[in-house]
């Protein structure tokens, strides 16, 4: 790490940090295509960004980092790309296991995990279990994830409770719904970052991002490293968060 990156990290650390950062990791395909390479090379390089920004987030003291690694809609990509992504995820879970554990990181996952092939699900569940008591940072991989799918799942869970007589329909409020989300045990998402210059939410953390700050980075995800993450955190720290309020209720991030 360069001296200037380390200095910038210290400066960012000294100001109020987002507790939970979500990242829509976009642009792997375009990165590879621009070089005339297969799209999978972009995902491979994107895995290196995942490793670098996770380390950086952990050093700075971000409590929760959620990475949109594979959407519920991504299953419709060509089978070779899906298979390549699954292999990269497996490799990541196996190769990063020691680093995750040594750094006190809890590895978590949200999404329709039952749809994942066992080559990914098995190392994922193992690392999830073995890291469950870690408290330094929670790293959540959104896998086969969709915000709408998550809301449908939560609605169904509530309906089942009503059907079983455990809950009255009139008792359902925001708290009850949030408790059925896959992210129920995570803090509110303070900052959502999307790379590659696109300005869309793409079914990511729809409920959870109601009051999030959004920062859009121009870098394609394989080029999104510590320095770009610091740019986004600095942008967040320049914002004033309102939560729909005015005057004295407004507080710094
Ligand atoms: C979107 O870029 C990215 C994905 C669908 C996959 C993200 C996966 C990784 C970063 C690597 C593996 C993940 C981990 C956690 C090790 P895109 O392909 O849609 O880009 P494009 O818009 O340029 O086509």
Image (cartoon, helix red, strand yellow):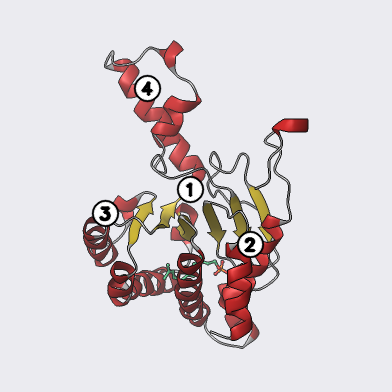
According to the picture, the residue beneath numbered tag 1 turns out to be 146
Between circles 1 and 3, the one closer to the viewer is: 3
Image quarter for residue 244?
Answer: top right
Q: Which mark is first along the chain, 4 or 3?
A: 3
Q: Is residue 211 left or right of residue 125?
A: right
Residue 105 in picture, x, y percent from top left: 35, 62
* Residue at the (58%, 71%) spot, across then down: 9
* Residue 132 drawn above or below residue 82: above
* Residue at the (49%, 76%) spot, across then down: 52
Image quarter for residue 31?
Answer: bottom right
Q: Furthest residue to the front?
A: 14
According to the picture, the residue beneath numbered tag 2 turns out to be 233
Q: CA distance from mark 1 to mark 4?
A: 20 Å
According to the picture, the residue beneath numbered tag 3 turns out to be 132
* Residue 138 drawn above or below residue 152: below
Q: CA distance from mark 3 to mark 4?
A: 29 Å
Q: Which mark is first along the chain, 2 or 3?
A: 3
- Secondary structure of the residue carrying numbered label 2: helix
According to the picture, the residue beneath numbered tag 4 turns out to be 159
Which label is found at residue 6? none
């Amino acid at each position: 790490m360069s001296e200037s990156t380390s200095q910038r990290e210290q400066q960012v650390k000294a100001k109020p940090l987002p507790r939970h950062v979500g990242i829509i990791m976009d642009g792997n395909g375009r990165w590879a295509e621009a070089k005339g390479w297969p799209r999978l090379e972009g995902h491979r390089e994107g895995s290196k960004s995942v490793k670098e920004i996770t380390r950086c987030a952990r050093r700075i003291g971000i409590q929760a980092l959620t990475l949109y690694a594979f959407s519920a809609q991504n299953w419709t990509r060509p089978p070779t790309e899906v298979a390549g992504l699954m292999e990269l995820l497996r490799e990541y879970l196996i190769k990063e296991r020691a680093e995750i554990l040594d750094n006190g990181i809890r590895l978590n996952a949200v999404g329709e995990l039952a749809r994942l092939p066992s080559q990914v699900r098995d190392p994922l569940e193992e690392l999830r279990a073995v890291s469950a008591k870690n408290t330094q940072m929670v790293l959540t991989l959104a896998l086969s994830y969709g915000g709408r799918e998550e809301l449908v799942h939560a609605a169904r869970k509530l309906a089942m409770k009503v059907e079983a007589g455990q809950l009255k329909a009139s008792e359902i409020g925001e708290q009850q719904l949030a408790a059925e989300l896959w992210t129920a045990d995570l803090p509110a998402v303070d900052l959502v970052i999307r790379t590659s210059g696109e300005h869309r939410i793409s079914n990511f953390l729809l409920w959870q991002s109601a009051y999030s700050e959004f920062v859009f980075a121009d870098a394609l995800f394989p080029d999104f490293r510590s320095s770009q993450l610091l740019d986004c955190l600095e942008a967040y720290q320049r914002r004033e968060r309102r939560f729909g309020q005015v005057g004295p209720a407004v507080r710094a991030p």
